[in-house]
Image (tube, helix red, strand yellow):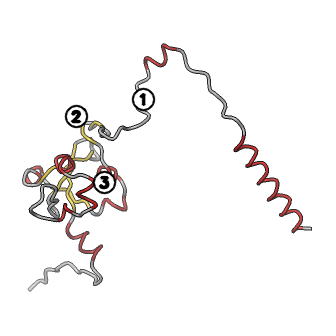
Amino acid sequence: MLKKLMITTASLALLTSAAVAQAPDQVQPSPPAATVAKAQVITEQKPDQLLASKFKGTNESYRYTVAHWCATEARFRNHLKKIKKEDAAKLISLENMLVRITQQDVVYRRYLAPDHRSYVPDFGVYIRVQGTNGVSEYRSRDSWAYQRATSFQPMIPPIAIPT
């Protein structure tokens, strides 16, 4: 009895999904012209466009990248360390780095060659992210987190032994 019930339920679900898939799309009525003129929503991003956002504290715009999203995620946040503005002046901005790298550079791994224009120095790039108090912070890749993630042996930080 249970077997018949399961087979009947599965076949009804299959028939219903096929019928829904073949149903014609319903056209939604277009909104009035006044509403369309006010709406400034970007529904798709063109290949030559970069997504922009603004810092809440300063209202300054910046290009929002995957690295900025990673700074908001707890699982990736450990790989980005806070740095001072003076230290960031010695590094290359991520926005400036992205302009120099093409998809072909990534495919052929040219970004690893120190003599190529798309070379990305390890731990030599920084980003500005929104801080918790509304002020922008500078972040760079954390070498200690990178060593922990890529090593097979546990890395133990040096401990100062009192004498």
In the rendering, at what x and y percent does residue 55 appear? 26, 38
User: Which residue is drawn at the image coordinates 30% and 54% (left, top)?
Assistant: 71
Crowding near pointer 1: few (<14 within 10 Å), some, many (20+)? few
In the rendering, at what x and y percent does residue 143 appear? 19, 68
- Compared to residue 52, the image places residue 125 above or below, namely below
SS assignment at label 3: helix
The answer for how far apart the CA atoms under marks 2 and 3 are is 18 Å
- Compared to residue 108, the image places residue 137 above or below, namely above
Viewer-side residue, 110 vs 67: 110
The residue that mark 2 highlights is 60
Which one is earlier in the sequence, the residue at label 2 or at label 3? 2
State yes or no: discs 2 and 3 in contact (Cβ < 8 Å).
no
The residue that mark 1 highlights is 41
Q: Amino acid at mark 3?
A: Ala
SS assignment at label 1: loop
Name the side, left or right, on which 32 lies relative to 150: right
In the rendering, at what x and y percent does residue 109 appear? 23, 64
Give the quadrant of residue 81: bottom left
The residue that mark 3 highlights is 71
Crowding near pointer 2: few (<14 within 10 Å), some, many (20+)? few
